[in-house]
């Protein structure tokens, strides 16, 4: 048996037979939702591969067309606060020095994440008017890369529900707080992550992403650094958002082996909202001096002459809580640059921080596009819930066996899709690989369809509570099917 990636590479470490392997220490997943984005649960496969899915272009979500916004709007953060969606981004009509007074922080809101409005907040006078959507101005250099978050830590004070970091290498990262996400104040004058803490040649000049991690019970921050002249990512943690640990450089793995080191301009790492123990990163891959456009093409789209000598696209990575590496399971792009010269300039196609639910079965990722051009905007791309990647079997069929695991609950739900001719059958084995009576392949009811949450059944029903807490393996037999995610749960919850 042989496991291959979409790129034709063979991974010997997954060449275990589908049965008969001695039990390992089981992976305790409890009632967590687990996505097929890495090999975290996979012991072995036969004619099944992990496949990255491409988001669907839904068009422009937000135009950067106000006088105080412009072609150099960047570093977008998409947040969900209850039933409201919030967008924050840098307003900058003309290129200039990082951290200049010309930079402001703009704000938009939405009831569904699809249609956005820019409220006239009246908080700051910019370009001679207070009739604008600016939430922070005259606060250089934090407005260069102001990156807010909704603080989900239990017991956080109401007037600090929103937190943000901003700053440059010269200033360090300065913390701000807000009760409503619109009126901001400094948490303290001194930077919470001072520049002397960071032992890298260059740092902080991109979006600096912080969040409360329920899995780690700490604040976590991922930020851009330079290492060996390559744009890399470092990680630091804090108990109180004020005192942070010494930053650690993140590495990259591809099925347990070192992955290529590429320039990643922004990392956009944050917990996935349906599985917060999994950190997802829709990062901007920057290809310096990889010029596509001619001078004539650049002039035709009216791009700033300094911003078409490079190219960029979006990639997808994941990380687990506490890990000092990203899983780069997929080396190919997550979102390729689109058709047209405007998509092949420097610093365009940069994903926003934040992937949010925008429909009963849909989530959305947003990309900053047409950078340094009059048509600069934020664009929305949709995907199925949990649909970043899947374990796929083609028409001839295939099999997937998980590592030993323990779970809690009395039922198992799958996020999956099949063709009309395809299907998924599931056998539950003991830790040694022997089928458990009542849950064998012969007992399995084939799952056919396309659902976000289908309860798996066997001839005796769907109740798996007799196996809860015991080491088991899941043996999937698939044909013309995609498995996106699985979750054990209690039917009463």
Image: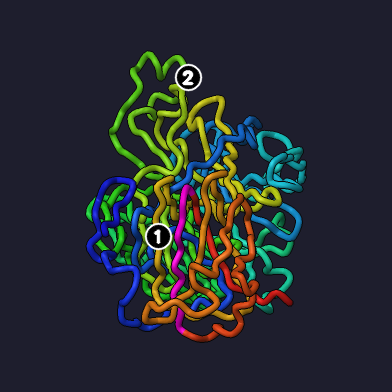
**Considering only vertical position in the picture, is 475 above or below 357?**
below
Q: State left or right for residue 95 relative to residue 9.
A: right
Main SS of the magenta part reads strand
Q: State left or right for residue 171 relative to residue 76.
A: left
Label 1 environment density (alpha carbons within 10 Å; few <14, some 14–19, many ≥20): many
- Taking the spot 41% from the left edge, 28% from the top edge, the residue there is 344
Compare residues 421 and 360 and report the one nearer the observer. 421
Residue 432: percent from the left, percent from the top?
Answer: 36, 81
**Considering only vertical position in the picture, is 111 above or below 372?**
below
Quarter of the image that includes the N terminus: bottom left
Can you tell which mark lies on residue 399?
Answer: 1
Dot 1 and dot 2 residues touching (CB under 8 Å): no
Q: Nearer the viewer, mark 1 or mark 2?
A: 1
Quarter of the image that includes the C terminus: bottom right
Sequence order check: which comes first, mark 1 or mark 2? 2
**Considering only vertical position in the picture, is 296 above or below 140?**
above
Q: Mark 1 to mark 2: distance in Å?
A: 52 Å
Q: State left or right for residue 19 relative to residue 184.
A: left
Compare residues 328 and 154 and report the one nearer the observer. 328
- Taking the spot 29% from the left edge, 32% from the top edge, the residue there is 290
Magenta residues (range):
471-480
Q: Residue reaching furthest front?
A: 442
Can you tell which mark lies on residue 302?
Answer: 2
């Amino acid at each position: 048996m042989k496991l291959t990636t979409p790129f034709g590479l063979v991974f010997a470490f997954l060449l275990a037979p589908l049965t008969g392997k001695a039990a390992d220490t089981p992976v305790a997943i409890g009632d967590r939702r687990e996505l097929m984005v890495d090999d975290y649960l996979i012991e072995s496969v036969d004619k099944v591969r992990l496949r990255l899915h491409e988001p669907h272009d839904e068009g422009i979500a937000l135009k950067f067309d106000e006088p105080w916004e412009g072609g150099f709007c960047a570093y977008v953060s998409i947040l969900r606060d209850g039933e409201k969606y919030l967008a924050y981004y840098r307003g900058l009509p003309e290129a200039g020095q990082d951290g200049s007074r010309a930079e402001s922080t703009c704000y938009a809101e939405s009831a569904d994440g699809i249609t956005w409005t820019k409220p006239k907040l009246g908080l700051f006078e910019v370009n001679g008017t207070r009739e604008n959507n600016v939430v922070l101005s005259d606060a250089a250099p934090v407005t260069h890369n102001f990156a807010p978050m909704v603080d989900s830590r239990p017991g956080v004070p109401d007037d600090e529900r929103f937190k943000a970091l901003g700053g440059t290498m010269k200033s360090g990262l300065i913390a701000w707080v807000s009760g409503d996400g619109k009126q901001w104040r400094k948490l303290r004058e001194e930077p919470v992550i001072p520049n002397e803490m960071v032992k890298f040649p260059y740092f902080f000049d991109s979006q600096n992403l912080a969040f409360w991690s329920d899995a780690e019970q700490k604040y976590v921050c991922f930020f851009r650094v330079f290492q060996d002249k390559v744009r890399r990512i470092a990680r630091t943690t804090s108990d109180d958002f004020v005192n942070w640990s010494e930053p650690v450089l993140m590495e990259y793995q591809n099925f347990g082996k070192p992955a290529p080191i590429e320039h990643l301009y922004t990392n956009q790492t944050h917990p996935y909202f349906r599985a917060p123990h999994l950190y997802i990163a829709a990062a901007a891959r920057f290809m310096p001096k990889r010029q596509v456009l001619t001078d004539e093409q650049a002039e035709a789209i009216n791009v700033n002459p300094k911003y078409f000598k490079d190219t960029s696209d979006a990639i997808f990575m994941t990380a687990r809580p506490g890990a000092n590496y990203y899983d780069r399971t997929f080396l190919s792009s997550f979102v390729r640059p689109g058709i047209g010269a405007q998509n092949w300039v420097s610093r365009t196609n940069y994903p926003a921080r934040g992937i949010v639910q925008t429909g009963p079965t849909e989530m959305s990722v947003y990309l900053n596009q047409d950078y340094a051009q009059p048509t600069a905007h934020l664009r929305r791309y949709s995907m199925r819930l949990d649909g970043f990647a899947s374990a796929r079997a083609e028409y001839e069929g295939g099999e997937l066996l998980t590592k030993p695991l323990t779970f809690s609950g009395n039922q198992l739900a799958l996020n999956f899709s099949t063709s009309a001719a395809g299907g998924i059958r599931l056998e539950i084995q003991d830790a040694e690989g022997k089928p458990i009576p009542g849950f064998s392949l012969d007992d399995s009811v084939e799952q056919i369809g396309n659902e976000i949450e289908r309860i798996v059944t066997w001839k005796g029903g769907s109740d798996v509570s007799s196996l809860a807490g015991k080491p088991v393996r899941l043996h999937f037999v698939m044909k013309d099917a995609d498995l996106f995610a699985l979750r054990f749960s209690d039917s009463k919850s």
